[in-house]
Amino acid sequence: MASWMLVLCVLAASLRQVWSSLEEHPPRVLSPWRKQGKGLSRVKRDWIIPQIRVLENSKQVPEALVQIKSDKIFTGEVIYKLEGPGVDQEPKNLFEIDDKSGVIRSKQPLDREKHRSFTLKAFALSPSGERLENPTTIEIVVLDQNDNRPVFTQSQFVGTVSEFSIPGTSVMSVSATDADDPTTENAILSYSIIGQESVPSQRRDQGHVVKSFRLRLQIADMSGQGLTSEGVAIIHVSDINNHAPQFRPAAYSFTALENRKSFEVGRVNVTDRDDPGTGNWEAKYSITNDPDGNFDISTDPVTNQGVLTVLTPLDFEARDEYNLKLRVENVNALSSKAPNLPLSTATVQVKVVNENEAPHFREDPVLIVVPESVPPGTLLKSNYAFDPENSKLRYEISRDPERWLDINRDSGDITAKKSFNMRSPHVRNNIYRAVVKVTDVGGLSTTGAVTITLKETNDFPPQVVPVSGSVCKEGTPEASGLVVTAVDQDYPPHAAPFIFEIPDDLPVNWTVSQLNATHAVLHPLVLLEAGEYAVPLLVSDSGRPALSSFAHVNITGSSVGISFIALIIIMASIALLLLLLLLAVAATTCGRRHHVRKGTGLLIGESEDDVRDNVFNYDEQGGGEEDENGFNIDLLWNPHDDPSTPGSYYPMPGFPRGKQPLRRDAPHNLPSPIYPRRPPADPTDIEDYISDGLEAADGDPNVPPYDTALIYDYEGEGSLSGSLSSIASGSSDGDQDYDYLNDWGPRFQKLANMYDPR
């Protein structure tokens, strides 16, 4: 198959000129065949078709661009077809081909900025549609025209240059673009400044500083000879710190009240010609002669003033005037282009204004440490308050609950009015608290706490108890003996342990053996005979110095004795029998109820008999374990008990050491103090109620020994268990036999009468 034959006819004027040119210069027809030897052979020929150049924006449309022709035209009819972008592909309808002549035409003006070239395929077909030739490639290149103006890349350019910059300093760059072909002069750009103005517009020689410049820019293509556009550039002149701040004025005078801190005294002013609001303008102040740090100066960010304040309270009496020296500089370092001048300074006089101040205590609280037995009139404290203005002070005691203190109204000396008492309810943890009030001549007053720490002293000698008793004379000397102890009104360490001794200079047939820190046993050295013996006994406490007391213990030698353990067993048996009796009565009195009135005895119905010597009345039943109001416990002494029984005086295990109440059977039968018998109405006063009861018990010389029974004087309210009167409530007990109560002795006679079936 022969290759394509191409006829290139670029027509400048019209299609007619193209055809005339073709007639004058017919295309050369290349034969696709040639002879080789005896026969013919087919030779393939490759044609290189040059680019077809078309000028953009042509007004002559349609315009013939080129004609193609196949060598098959000489042997038969040929039909030409064209395919590719601009024909049957986007952008469509830009080119067409004459299917008979093979002339390719442009149908509308081309735009190089949209499409720089087109690559098409040309086909030669038979009338039946059979390909006669291989398709050939046709490339159409659009030639550029200067049809686009250059444009700046920004609507406004902004740059900065420091003031006092030397000529030639690079300020900023501007840029522009041109859509035309960059390989042609159509895109060669030229920049220029066509106008400028300063902001503010006044001239520099009029004393104003230029803040910025506004420039009019122009860009032109074709090396400045073609199309043009304009732009704007703003160049700001940046400030440099070439002006140091200056005080205006340089001397100030202020006043400041004493005893105040963190308040403003006054303000100082400076001027600075640099740009306001910048570090080149902002002032930084300092005080050069304030070693104690009484003052501080800071900068107001809006006005640039120096604000002078007092840091620590001033004292007029100590110093009434301050002369300060101030210095100012900028936050930013001064430029090397600024004048070489020293830093600006100013002087400030601060006068302190006196105020009347309240008196002050030298210590808070006022501490006093004194023995509890200090003699009345002893000086406890002096010189503990003062007045800043040195005015005369007036002193008084504003709180002294025990009235133990005296105070000199003029000097303030605190003295003891009477000895202290460690057992006072107002002494907590050995500390007694009072309050002193101090007033100056101007009427200003201050109160201060006084804390008095009391030291325990050995004020009371121990006392031997009991001072009488009996021992079994039939026993051996080692097995017979009377247990004795001692009571001491002092607190540890001035009480127990006690030391019991029989003086060596007294000839007696008795000896004493120490049981523990609080008890000892008196033993006879020989077999006792019936009768009474007066045994001398010396007891000493552990105080510094120790105190002692001497007593004669009257011991009766008895043929009938009872041991302490036996006494305990008997008392436990009696309590158990009484409990069984109460349970039996509750179980057998079915249907029979005894109405118990408040104020009558337990187990008593409507009977008016007085059985208080046998059964004790509980005024309140209490709430058992859940009763939180039960609080007062008193010792019960039954006057019918035999005080001569030795076991009555033997201490229970765990007997508390320290201050012990005196026995009722002591030789000195003194009157007892008044006990608080009713609970307070306000629960918050319970603590005081208990303290008062304990204080009364400690001072009662007639209380019973610790091994006696206890009674709850008041057990509180809110018991969930109900009244014990329910024991007497039940069904009829008419069938019960209570005659056995008559056999229990006179103490149960009243109880037997209550259930007498007669």
Image: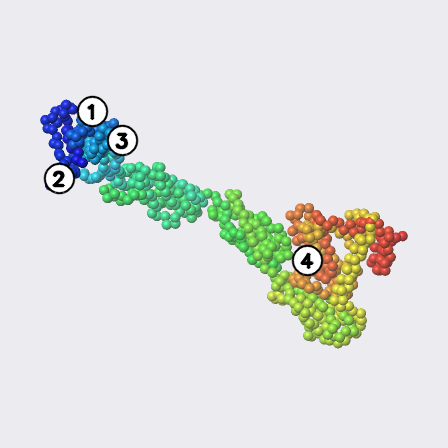
Give left or right: position of 25 versus 59: left
Q: Secondary structure at mark 2?
A: strand
Do labels 4 and 1 touch, CB within 8 Å? Answer: no
Residue type, numbered disc 3? Gln
Q: Which callout, 2 or 1, points at the residue further toward the start of the chain? A: 2
Residue pointed to by mark 4:
698
Q: Secondary structure at mark 3?
A: loop
Q: Which callout, 4 or 1, points at the residue further toward the start of the chain? A: 1
Residue 261 in the image: x percent, y percent? 43, 44
Q: Residue at x 69, y 64 (%)?
A: 653
Residue 299 in the image: x percent, y percent? 35, 41
From mark 4 to mark 1, how far is it between C-alphas? Answer: 138 Å
Residue pointed to by mark 3:
89
Q: Residue at x 14, y 29 (%)?
A: 9
Residue pointed to by mark 1:
62
Q: Which mark is residue 697?
A: none
From mark 2 to mark 3, how far is it between C-alphas? Answer: 46 Å
- Neighbour class for label 2 at 10 Å: few (<14), some, many (≥20)? few
Give left or right: position of 89 versus 690: left
Residue type, numbered disc 2? Gly
